[in-house]
Amino acid sequence: GQNIDQPTEMTATEGAIVQINCTYQTSGFNGLFWYQQHAGEAPTFLSYNVLDGLEEKGRFSSFLSRSKGYSYLLLKELQMKDSASYLCAVLDSNYQLIWGAGTKLIIKP
Amino acid sequence: DVKVTQSSRYLVKRTGEKVFLECVQDMDHENMFWYRQDPGLGLRLIYFSYDVKMKEKGDIPEGYSVSREKKERFSLILESASTNQTSMYLCASSFALAGRGTGELFFGEGSRLTVL
């Protein structure tokens, strides 16, 4: 079966750095997405990786290793507004999105 | 500014009622999706459509149907609502990649349905 694993919840301190991991086992791979979802709101796109390596976008970076079936989202200089759920999703060989259950990130002052 | 609009943010229905959830996008996207989101579970795909009048079942289509008569509008129908359909329903749209692949999804605000 297809599977996406992410930690259920993480806690970090304002101003610090946090890494949210995502491991996947899917039938094929056509890219990996990260979305941010604040409580009660719709998910919004953060990043898309299809090649190995690190992609940086401001305070957020996303890393992919296809051989390891692994990605992480790195958030730097954490702000209170970064408190949200972070969803990992993989596009499989049929171009269907497989979603993880999401990681709830709690930022403490 | 791109926009996906869902008709109702909150609905309360009784068991057995017919429920319509409507979604409109203004980005001329080919693909449209209906998901449900429940605590502790990932987004689960109910139905999707990659063109007008085209629809395909997702992972959990039982108890649901959809309609896409116009490119910008994708409706989700619960023919006879049941309590286990209480959930958050999210509509999304995207441009197509590689034919039926999908690019970045744009989501609506969600419709929280409670079935009593």
Image (cartoon, rainbow, N blue to C red):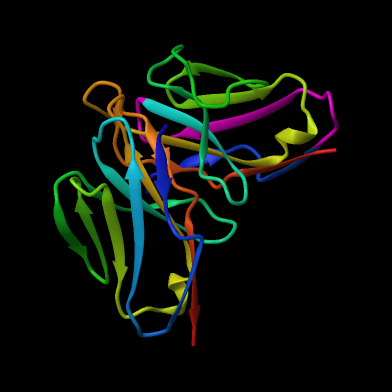
Q: Is residue B15 magenta?
A: yes
Q: Is residue B43 left or right of residue A46?
A: right
Q: Nearer the viewer, residue A51 or B113?
A: A51
Residue, x 25% and y 35% (percent of image)? A29
Q: Is residue A80 above or below residue B60?
A: below
Q: Could you say where residue A16 lies in the image, as x and y percent from the top left?
A: 35, 83
Q: Is residue A95 above or below residue A3?
A: above
Q: Could you say where residue A98 lies in the image, as x and y percent from the top left?
A: 40, 37
Outermost residue toward the bottom in this view: A109
Residue, x 46% and y 11% (percent of image)? B53
* Quarter assignment of residue A60: bottom left
Q: Is residue B31 left or right of residue A29?
A: right
Q: Which residues are magenta?
A: B13-30
Residue, x 36% and y 35% (percent of image)? B27
- Tell me the quadrant of the picture where the N terminus of chain A can be found: top left
Q: Could you say where residue B4 lies in the image, as x and y percent from the top left?
A: 47, 40
Q: How many marks?
A: 0
Q: Is residue B50 left or right of residue A83?
A: left
Q: Is residue B116 above or below residue A96?
A: below
* Quarter assignment of residue B2: top left
Residue, x 63% and y 20% (percent of image)? B62
Q: Is residue B115 magenta?
A: no
Q: Could you say where residue A83 lies in the image, as x and y percent from the top left?
A: 48, 70
